[in-house]
Amino acid sequence: MSRFGRSRPDLEADPAPSERSSGGPLLEVTDLRTSFRTDRGLLKAVDGVTFTLEQGQTLGVVGESGSGKTVLSRSVMGLLPAGKKTLRGGSVRFEGRDIGDRSAAEMRDVWGQDIAMVFQDPMTSLNPVVRIGRQITEGLRHHLDMDKGTARETAVALLRSVGIPEPERRLDQYPFELSGGMRQRVTIAIAISCGPKLLLADEPTTALDVTVQAQILNLLQDKQRERHMAMILVTHDLGVVAGRTDHIAVMYAGRVVETAPTATLFGSMRMPYTEALLKCIPRTTDPSHTRLSALGGRPPDLISPPEGCRFAPRCPYAQERCHHEDPPLEYDASGTHAWACWYPVGTAEGSAALEANLSSGRPQALVAVGAGADAVREADAAAETEAIEAARQTEVALRPEPA
Amino acid sequence: MTAELAQPTTAAHLRGGDPLLLVDQLVVEYPAGGGRSVHAVSGVSLDVFPGETLGLVGESGCGKSTTGKAIMQMPRPNSGSVRFGGDELTALRGEALRRVRPRLQMIFQDPISSLNPRRKVRDIVGEPLDIWQRGDKASREEKVDEVLEAVGLDPVAAGSRLPHEYSGGQCQRISVARALVLEPLMLICDEPVSALDVSVQAQILNLLEDMKARYNLTMVFIAHDLAVVKNVSDRVAVMYLGKLCEVAPPDELYASPAHHYTAALLASVPVADPSVRPGLVADALRGEPPSPVDPPSGCRFRTRCPRAEGRCADEEPLMREVRLGHFVACHFPIEDTEFHAPR
């Protein structure tokens, strides 16, 4: 598994646009690895992720902060910081072309026309000192060679199509004059303006209210269907991807730990991490004061991840074996549902493992069933203290290198 | 059966008796320039009894945070009264108001920016005790140890570490410890979990429930996430554009909302079940709230309400009891049988 740090293949080696394979999947990510050199050592933010996405399909990528989902989407998009501190491995093939190793300058023809992105915070992803109109028409004029008048007309139509009232007036406004929901609609209009085949949405609704969140998710879904785009929806909330995606990949510590068609995943989840993520969401249908099943701690430090299964230190099911042997991501007989676990949820081994942990008083298991408040609180805190570095290290590593 | 239900008034939902906190006709307005003003809170009345948690829920800009801050007298409300444990807070000034604060504490949304980045965590938690000179130094240290342990942090490590050495969830634990160290009667939590991951959110919600039991707290819990509010609350008040539109016990409110706004909010909550088609229910609430500078006449929700009629523009709906303990300000409330919550 050490395809790491390999030399960059020459871009000329890529098939020319005319030689694109038309039958293959739209996006093919193979053993993608993204690491950052930090002062403390190598931080493996994405550690061997493989998936394919067909045209018009929606993939949900789910995980906590620090699970590598944002670095994954940025690796696909080619938005990693340049320089020696970033190491890339594996391949990202879009319509058969390898785009994984392209520089920002080389990606300009891909961005907007082939792949577009919607970010979490619409205030920082829009330029605060440029009018909305110019921010939308910029891509239209550059990629589609529109003249000023046509681009403006198209921009009005785009704003109307994403549900912005009085689009003509909005073109001359600045981002600060719009509400958060309206700004996110503008970034969606920009993202779809040049007709991309793939839309990456990285936590597009995390900064928004629940009502606006529903509106924006519906809008993304409508546009995706209308234009037959493929979409990758990155989020920490399983509630957001349920019912809005065809397929889900759950990420933990830089790896995919479970992947399945959405209905299968919710119907028979196997990975204890997926189960924990789902169970800690409060539901409006539960009576008030229902004790939440908490997931203690945080994702591990990706510079020195734990031996064996990376989720084992927080897992309610973990046994001795989990701390030494790394479970592989393996597909079941259906060939669509894969998980990486020795004691999967809903199997005889899994139930026996949980039972054993409960009777031996393993705190992580107690947390999961919400027993004994004091023991649980200590378990939460202990697990959290083990790895508070992880998220900060990733953040530091992601900062662009000073020129 | 109507005989048992309260008569409609502007504050029919107030229960009388001896609440710990009684907010009556609270009004907060900010100048917006040009002689206009932002009507952030327009006549909100609330009562919270000892040991109770009141959930205050609504979209951004509905005035829920302003209500929480106006209870603390930061800023002072333009009019209305805030009675807390026998004191009329709006009448208190200077030192007299300061003396109330140890009994009335607040937790904020962003756990990192609400802690001084240059002070040791132990000092942050201990500072309120030093200011009030509670007991001698040894007993203060003991109290800090106790509170830090109660929220699940190591008191010894906290003596040498700064806030940035803790994660977001741990910083929120520190905020809780700081608020509890003076043993307040009431805790106002303003969006305490909305900046946190779902896994950490569950830990903090459980922690608040434990602390409520351990320190006999009364809480006002402000949030925009309906599921979170339901989990911690004994009574929920739904707020829209500066006014309350519905007040009820949580199980009743979520099972059969009477206000069209509440029903729309509930329909917007993402459900972690792929068999629920979100597209069908979530379109119920279109558009965004109107500007609080120039709120609509009559019922403030009428511009987005599916049932609005002429009467809603002319006449402001009073708070009335539609079912026992369930109050709604609407001329055409949803009948008990009409609403089917997504399961």
Image: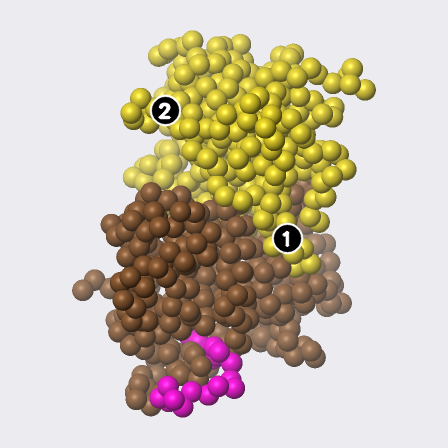
Q: In this view, does B298 lie above or below A333?
A: above
Q: What range is drawn magenta here?
A: A15-38
Q: In which quarter of the image is residue B9?
A: top right
Q: In which quarter of the image is residue A318?
A: bottom right
Q: In which quarter of the image is residue B234?
A: top right
Does B336 sit left or right of A396 as displayed? Answer: right
Chain in yellow, by letter, is: B
Q: Determine which residue is flagged by label 1.
A: B280
Residue A239 image position (x, y, % from top left): 59, 54
Q: Determine which residue is flagged by label 2.
A: B37
* Residue drawn at 50 percent across, 25 percent down: B297
What is the secondary structure assignment of the residue under circle 2? Answer: strand
Q: Pinpoint the chain carrying mark 1.
A: B
Whether the magenta-drawn stretch holds residue A20 is answered as yes
What is the secondary structure assignment of the residue under circle 1? Answer: helix
Q: Quadrant of the N terminus of chain B?
A: top right
Residue B147 appears anywhere in the view = no
- How far, Cα to Cα, is label 2 from label 1? 38 Å
Does A131 sit left or right of B203 as displayed? Answer: left
Q: Pinpoint the chain carrying mark 2.
A: B
* Residue drawn at 30 percent across, 47 percent down: A173
The front one of A231 and A329 is A231
Mark closest to the chain's N terminus, 2 or 1: 2
Residue B160 image position (x, y, % from top left): 35, 42
